């Protein structure tokens, strides 16, 4: 801090004084490097894609509830007979 100086008074109030008026003038003066017009915070492209994907999922109809209800009924009736090859094919296709 170049504005810190010792007082030159001969009284008992000797110490360090900060020049607030000069500091205020420097703070109010325009900076040497002007800001670029494009500066600012923004949302990344991946964040936009995530928001869009979330909106699509929220807008999708909930058709799984009907399928689950039908499968539960088949299991309860004893008529549900899954095809093990089809299950394996789906697992491999999804990469699970």
Image (tube, helix red, strand yellow):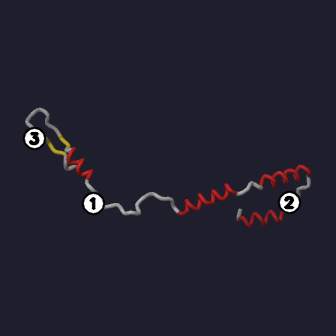
Element type at marker 2? loop
Q: Residue furthest left?
A: 10
80 displayed left or right of 57: right
Q: Tell which tag, 3 or 2, sits nearer the viewer.
A: 3
Q: Which residue does the numbered mark 3 point to in the structure image? A: 8
Left or right: residue 74 compared with residue 47: right
Among numbered discs 2 and 1, the one appearing first in the sequence:
1
Q: Tell me, for residue 82, which label it has, or none.
A: 2
Camera-near label (2 vs 1) is: 1
Q: Quadrant of the C terminus?
A: bottom right
Q: Position of residue 70 (x, y in %)?
A: 85, 53
The answer to whether 15 is drawn above or below residue 35 in the figure is above
Q: CA distance from mark 3 to mark 2?
A: 96 Å
Mark 1 or mark 3: whose residue is earlier in sequence? 3
Secondary structure beneath dot 1 equals loop
The reply to whether the C-beta atoms of the residues labelled 2 and 1 are less than 8 Å apart is no
- The answer to whether residue 46 is left or right of residue 59 is left
Dot 3 alpha-carbon crowd within 10 angstroms: few under 14, some 14 to 19, many 20 or more: few
Please report whichever mark, 3 or 2, sits nearer to the chain's N-terminal start.
3
Label 2 environment density (alpha carbons within 10 Å; few <14, some 14–19, many ≥20): few
Q: Position of residue 51 (x, y in %)?
A: 59, 58
> Taking 50 as reference, is 6 above or below it?
above
Quickly name the residue at label 1. 32
Please name the residue shown 9% across and 38% down the image: 9
Which residue is located at x 35 percent, y 61 percent?
35
């Amino acid at each position: 801090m170049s504005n810190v100086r010792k007082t030159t008074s001969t009284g008992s109030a000797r110490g360090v004084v900060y020049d607030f008026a000069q500091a205020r003038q420097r703070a109010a003066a325009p900076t040497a490097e002007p800001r670029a017009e494009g500066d600012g915070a923004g949302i990344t492209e991946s964040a936009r894609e995530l928001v869009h994907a979330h909106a699509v999922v929220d807008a999708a109809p909930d058709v799984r509830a009907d399928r689950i209800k039908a499968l539960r009924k088949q299991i309860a009736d004893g008529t549900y007979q899954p095809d093990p090859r089809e299950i394996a094919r789906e697992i491999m296709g999804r990469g699970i």
